[in-house]
Image: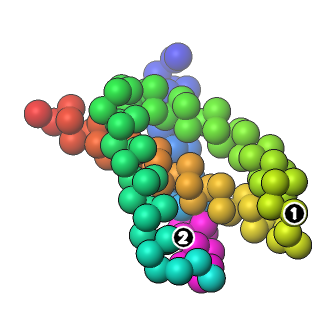
Amino acid sequence: MTPSLDRIAWVTFLILVPLLWASGFRLFIRSTFPAAKKIGWSLFLVLVGLAVGALLPLPGIRNRFALLLLALPLLAIVDIQLAKSNRTFLFWFRACAFEVCTVFGVAALTRFLLDLR
């Protein structure tokens, strides 16, 4: 990857992760799930992110995030079919975005901290 494309990829990653995460987080907080379920699911996503961050270098994390970002609309459609609810595409897109961004945000932070040592 050329240096300019690399910079564009990082800027995209650093802008999209917080924006998509915040949108999905608001949805997650307002959901009707019991608090214990919300905490458990959040901890699971963080643990997956820690594992990914321990295994992959930062560019690998960013590149895999980009692939899943492209797949988010498909993931939302799959959720619509699986859930059989009257939730909209945008609802499931935001839900998937929260999960993907939590995992990859934690992974990037983990890898960054590991690389500081």
The residue sitting at 39% across, 53% down in the picture is 46
Work out whether residue 76 or residue 33 is closer to the camera in this orientation and state it: 33
The residue sitting at 21% across, 41% down in the picture is 113
The residue sitting at 44% across, 75% down in the picture is 36
Identify residue type, mark 2.
Answer: Phe
Distance between mark 1 and mark 2 Cα atoms: 22 Å
Work out whether residue 59 or residue 26 is closer to the camera in this orientation and state it: 26
57 is higher (above) or lower (below) than 8: above
Q: Is residue 21 magenta?
A: no
The numbered mark, 1 or 2, whose residue comes first in the sequence reads 2
Identify residue type, mark 1.
Answer: Lys
Tag 2 residue = 25
- Disc 2 crowd rating (10 Å Cα; few below 14, some 14-19, many 20+) is some
Mark drawn on residue 84 = 1
Image coords of residue 34 (percent x, y)? 53, 80
Image coords of residue 4 (percent x, y)? 51, 26
102 sits left or right of 75 in the view: left
Q: Which contiguous range is marked in magenta?
A: 22-31
